[in-house]
């Protein structure tokens, strides 16, 4: 399956601004498996000073942090969602972000694009990044 072209996406300056302003990142689909990209990226971000909030339905703790079953269950403010889920899940994730009202950044990892969900998030005032790895982008700064 080929990923669609992102029609909604942030540029390098916006990504730089994102990393300056974001403190708390909910990682949706954060696997406890250390060999998985989601785990490596989350660990990298955690090691670089970001508070990581795992969202994964099958664990109690990942990377030493309490795991939540859904975005709605997180009882404190979240600046960014970092999404490791299939593109068709992004519509519901965008809706959950909008419902929370505190998410500033909607970030779909490398290979993940859903332009409809991205536009919905952008229209709600979020910055949107699609088909880019947050770890790679952070390292490039």
Image: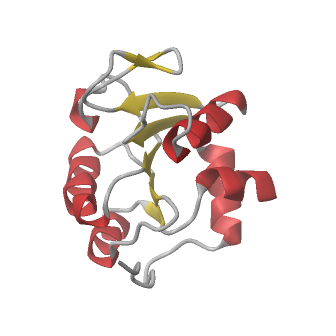
Number of labels in the image equals 0
Dividing the image into 4 quarters, which one contains the N terminus? bottom left
Instruction: Say if residue 61 shows up in the picture.
Output: yes
Of residues 107 and 42, the one drawn nearer to the viewer in this rendering: 42
- Name the residue at 33% across, 72% down: 114
Of residues 71 and 131, the one drawn nearer to the viewer in this rendering: 131
Instruction: Say if residue 141 shows up in the picture.
Output: no
Q: Classify residue 48 as left or right of residue 14.
A: right
Q: Is residue 49 above or below residue 127?
A: above
Residue 27, quarter of the rendered image: top left
Q: Classify residue 82 as left or right of residue 23.
A: left
**Percent from the top left, x then y, of residue 56?**
32, 32
Of residues 138 and 95, the one drawn nearer to the viewer in this rendering: 138
**Percent from the top left, x then y, of residue 92?**
19, 56
- Name the residue at 30% across, 25% down: 68
Dividing the image into 4 quarters, which one contains the C terminus? bottom right
Q: Classify residue 39 as left or right of residue 114.
A: right
- Name the residue at 52% across, 64% down: 110
- Name the residue at 69% across, 47% down: 20
- Scheme by which the image is coloured: secondary structure
Q: Classify residue 44 as left or right of residue 109.
A: right
**Percent from the top left, x then y, of residue 69?**
24, 29
């Amino acid at each position: 399956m080929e990923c669609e072209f992102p029609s909604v996406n942030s540029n390098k300056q916006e990504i730089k601004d994102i990393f300056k302003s974001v403190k708390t990142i909910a990682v949706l689909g954060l696997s406890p498996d250390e060999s998985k990209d989601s785990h490596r990226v989350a660990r990298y971000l955690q090691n670089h000073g970001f508070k990581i909030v795992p969202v994964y339905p099958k664990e109690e703790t990942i990377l030493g942090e309490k795991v939540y079953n859904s975005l709605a269950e997180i009882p404190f403010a979240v600046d960014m969602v970092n999404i490791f889920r299939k593109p068709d899940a992004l519509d519901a994730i965008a809706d959950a972000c909008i419902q929370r009202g505190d998410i500033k950044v909607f970030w779909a990892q490398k290979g993940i694009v859903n332009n409809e969900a991205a536009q919905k998030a952008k229209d709600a005032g979020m910055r949107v990044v699609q088909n880019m790895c947050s770890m790679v982008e952070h390292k490039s700064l």
